[in-house]
Image (spheres, rainbow, N blue to C red):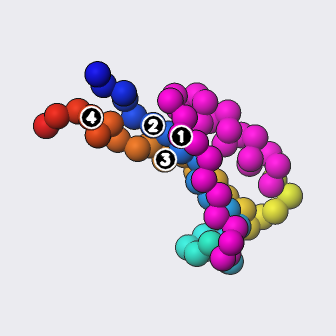
Amino acid sequence: MTRGSLFWVIGGEFGSMNFHKLVEGSAQVKGPFKTRKEAEDCWKEVSEESRHKAGVRYTIVEEPDRSAKA
């Protein structure tokens, strides 16, 4: 049975506007989501909640399907 890829929303508050390092304790991980649409809906929600904070960013990452045989 192939489960397909999973999607995660990750992010938090960054220490500077170059967005290289998260502020300790601010990291957030939401998911897993079975579809990209579900992850996008979550991303929109958390992004909207933090829109007044310029140093907060979130992104969607896809976890590859590990059940597929090479």
Give the residue pinned by disc 4: 67
Could you tell which of marks 1 and 2 lies nearer the N-terminus?
2
Magenta stretch?
23-50
How far from the left and from the top, in percent, is residue 34? 50, 30
Q: Amino acid at mark 1?
A: Pro
Q: Is residue 41 left or right of residue 70?
A: right
Residue 64 seen: yes
Q: Amino acid at mark 4?
A: Ser
How far from the left and from the top, in percent, is residue 45? 75, 40
Question: Is the Cβ of the residue at disc 4 closer than 8 Å to that at disc 3?
Answer: no
Q: Is residue 32 left or right of residue 5?
A: right
Crowding at mark 2 (Cα within 10 Å: few <14, some 14-19, many 20+): some
Give the residue pinned by disc 3: 61
Residue 17 seen: no
- The verdict on residue 49 being magenta is yes
Question: Is the Cβ of the residue at disc 1 closer than 8 Å to that at disc 2?
Answer: yes
